[in-house]
Image (cartoon, rainbow, N blue to C red):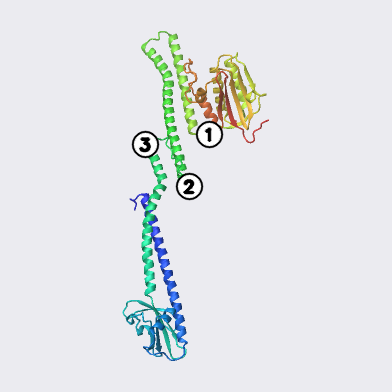
Amino acid sequence: MRRLSLRARLLLLTASLLLAGLTLIGTLVSGELERFQLDRLDGQLRSMTELISRASGPPPAATPAVRPDLVDPALELFGTPYVVYLDASGAVAGGFHSSRVDSATLPPSDALRSVPADGTAVDLDAADRSQRWRAVSRPAVRWGGRVVSAAPLAEADATIAQLRTSSLVTGAALLVVLTAAGWFALGRGLLPLRRIEHTAAAIAGGDLSRRVPDLAPPGTEIGHLAASLNTMLGQLDRAFADRAASEARMRTFVSDVSHELRTPLFGIKGSTELYRMGALRGPSDVDETMRRIDREATRLTALTEDLLLLAQLDEAPEEQLDRTPMDLRTLAGDARHDLRALDPAREVSLTGPGGLGPPGPAPVDADEARLRQVVTNLVGNAAAHTPAGTPVRIGVGTVAGRAVLEVADEGPGMTAEQASRAFHRFYRADRSRTRTPGADAGLGLAIARSLARAHGGDVELETAVGEGACFRLALPVPESGSTD
């Protein structure tokens, strides 16, 4: 059974149910017809027996001289071709039968005596076993004995046999026709499954963009199956795309890390090679070389710490925080002083969010040291990527239930492609920029966003070419936080 196709199994099951149904219907119909004929015949026999049992006078002779042309129509009218009189001892006292009935086919006397006298109809076999009879007996009213009326069941049996034969032939023909029709109907009904199979085969062959077409209305089983498969295929496609993107990011990350680590390591190694070769002739040369080694070691340490922090934030961000209640206005004021210290010629203004009004309260439940690191990265980014003297606005306050701190500059801004990658690790919008030792390796904005998200917030960027850039730190306000 398991080796058969789904179509064959469904057809076999359907054909079996159809055969069982036809057999049941045929059995019920033939049984009802047989019951109907027996009830009708029993009624005729009882009527005839009741009529004769109440007739006056002794029973006629065993072989009465009656005219067949008168007796036969009367017996056929009552449907009782055989009438027998039994005396009190059960012996045959007389009787008559239709001339159309052969005497050899009549039931024997012993069988007639076994018929109960309460009017219950029973089946009797003919003397020559050629057919069955139906008999009813009643006690005589006017004399001591009883009357037995009998009728052959040959006609009823023939009708039932003909009905069963017709049912068998008709049922077999109907079964063949419906089985053939079912084969083609199941073929069309299973066509959506074949299309799903072909789609799955195409996907297994590598075409991950294939989807199951709309084969049926959404409310049907096929519709549900197609929708579920398309959802699953979409998730698989995205998973493969995400994996490919992750692998690409990992390759880029490894390449960038290798580059960033190689630069200070080569500086340190080159300085040590110079010392080993004796190229450092005087104390001033040794001191300069040691200062260079120290700068590269400091740069290497800072890069290693940034990478470690990013790894910790990826694995367990909440564990890296020591939250306490604070206000972002403190960080905004310190950021203003830091920018002025970096570039005294730069105009730095302190406003509310969006440059509207004065600074407002921005209470948060956060790790102040980590948020200072975020703001320092944003301020350093503005100082490093805008010309000297470019105005910078620092906005702080509460907007739509979030505490906001903005660092907006009026610099050259970024393209949409640059903005989409600004928070990627090791990404720098201008890779040709000459960086001093210890300069940002392209991890500052990535660390800032990771720390903001660890606090349940985010760092957003609004920028356009020639319109500057606005980095916005947004954090949730505690339920008990004040917005006054």
Q: Earlier in the sequence, mark 3 or mark 1?
A: 3
| Residue 261 x, y percent position in the rendering | 43, 21
| Residue 420 x, y percent position in the rendering | 51, 25
Residue 321 appears in which quarter of the rendering? top right
Q: Do callouts 2 and 1 mark residues in contact (Cβ within 8 Å)? A: no
| Residue 234 x, y percent position in the rendering | 45, 37
Q: Given this view, does label 3 or label 2 mark the residue nearer the observer? A: 2
- The residue identified by callout 1 is 318
The kind of residue tagged 1 is Glu
Residue 114 visible in the shown view? no
Residue at 43% of width from left, 74% of height from top? 38
Q: Earlier in the sequence, mark 2 or mark 1?
A: 2
Residue 205 is marked as 3
* CA separation in Å, label 3 and label 2: 29 Å
Q: Judge from the rendering whether residue 354 lies leftward or rightward of residue 205; answer left or right.
A: right
Residue at 66% of width from left, 27% of height from top? 360
* CA separation in Å, label 3 and label 1: 43 Å
The kind of residue tagged 2 is Thr
For residue 392, above or below residue 77: above
- The residue identified by callout 2 is 220
* Element at label 1: helix
* Element at label 3: loop
Residue furthest to the front in view is 69
Q: Given this view, does label 3 or label 1 mark the residue nearer the observer? A: 3
In the image, 275 versus 257, the foreground residue is: 257
* CA separation in Å, label 2 and label 1: 46 Å
In the image, 214 versus 168, the foreground residue is: 168
Neighbours of disc 3 within 10 Å: few (<14), some (14-19), many (20+): few
